[in-house]
Image (spheres, rainbow, N blue to C red):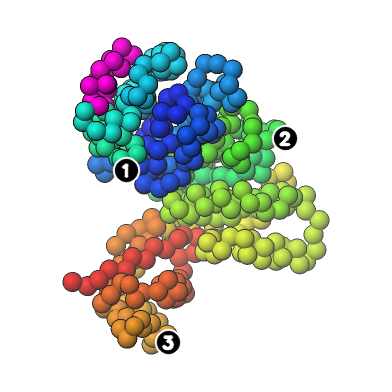
Amino acid sequence: MNKPTVAIVGRPNVGKSTIFNRIVGERISIVEDTPGVTRDRIYGTGEWLSHEFHIIDTGGIEIGDAPFLEEIRLQAEIAIEEADVIIFIVNSREGVTSADEEVAKILFRSKKPVVLAVNKVDNPEMRADIYDFYALGFNEPFPISGSHGLGLGDLLDEVVNHFPESKEENEEEDVIKFSLIGRPNVGKSSIVNALLGEERVIVSDIAGTTRDAIDSTYEFDEQKYTIIDTAGMRKKGKVYENTEKYSVLRALKAIDRSDVVLVVLNGEEGIQEQDKKIAGYAHEAGRAVIIVVNKWDAVEKDEKTMKEFEEKIRAHFLFLDYAPIVFVSAKTKKRLTNLFPAIKMASENHEMRVQSSVLNDVIADAIAMNPTPSDKGRKLKIFYVTQVGIKPPTFVVFVNDPEIMHFSYERFLQNRIREAFGFEGTPIHIITRQRK
């Protein structure tokens, strides 16, 4: 299901990054008391009242000749275009400025719901300062303090009220949805076109030609698939054409809707650092993952080349040790049909359920092979293990003291579960709880 998107917008130095960090719960965005320091949007996921949403921290909008301001304004406009709800941040200590009025004009043109937040209201006596902001023409302003976390609950209550109603996706249950993610020019669109046998997605040698996620349907061996193509993701910090700035968000939305994610690598260029970051999005989202090496036809090879490339992938993508690797060529269509059995297997494993009695027999055998660890004279006791969820398969291990469960032993149990039941292509989540 698609998560709503919230954009935090405002001129420089009103505290957008601080508020973003509060909502996301991590210190992701750079916070510095210099106007224009946030030069690119940062993406995160927030949750309020059981609603999950994407959130974008934009650079400030200002009309003037200062460095980066035109680019920041364009980024904010792109974020506005992507958002379902906009949080417009102003600074209570500076009052209504001409730059705030310019921002308000841009927001009125967006026709999107706007929630006005007056930041830096650090104590109740300062609440009288917010009424001047009614002049901006929006509804009641919300007094908040990003640095102290005050008023954010009321603000988020209002934001959630403006979320579009979630629509139940009327899709057939037996359809497997998969997306292709990766750096620009690794050949995602070429793979889609080769699979579909038609020029459904524009293909070009210019990196980043695909602008939007596009859905296509396909049937292979009596199994129906929905293919979601995404715009390529680029490294932060480099200046690219503005329409590519939100490709990461588009990819995140595609991942949300997918059962299986194909991480596409360029066999000709080899593995790059950005490939690992992109793959991390799918892994962290708990999706089934397949690593696809494209352009294999362009690689000079002998009988050892494929094995050596696989070893490099395993060394670089340690967190994806469960993901199968498929070598293909979109250009020659070689091995493309190998993708569908791998996708189907990964999807089935992603929603596999294991019988509790069999699962506990496997865990008992694992403990007999490798006894539980001890810490400060206390030995870990595992009482019971049960599967509590799918997509991804999630297991709860009931123990006497969760603090004694060392990461390495949890990893050992995970490996034993994989050996017993397979789960190729899907991550496994293990939660340790104290038995009450």
Residue 139, x across and y down, in percent: 26, 18
Compared to 388, does 107 lie above or below?
above
**Mark 3 → mark 1, Cα distance in angstroms:** 41 Å
Mark carried by residue 205: 2
Task: Give the residue at x 35% y 24%.
Answer: 93
> Are there few (<14), some (14-19), or many (20+) residues within 10 Å of tag 1?
some
The residue to which callout 1 is attached is 47
Q: Residues under labels 2 and 3: Cα distance? A: 54 Å
Q: CA distance from mark 2 to mark 1?
A: 39 Å
* Residue 46 locus on image (x, y percent): 36, 42
Q: Is residue 199 visible?
A: no
Left or right: 66 as drawn, with respect to 137: right
Q: Nearer the viewer's eye, disc 3 or disc 1?
A: 1
Q: Secondary structure at mark 2?
A: loop
Quadrant of the rendered structure where residue 410 is?
bottom left
Residue type of the residue flagged with mark 3: Met
Element on which disc 3 rests: helix
Question: Which residue is tagged 3?
Answer: 369
Residue at the image point whose x is 62% and y is 60% from the top: 316
Task: Check disc 1 and give the amino acid type.
Answer: Glu
Q: Magenta residues, as a range?
A: 126-142
Question: Image point 27% across, 21% down: which residue?
Answer: 130
Q: Quadrant of the C terminus?
A: bottom left
Counting residues from the N terminus, which is met first, the one under dot 2 or under dot 1?
A: 1
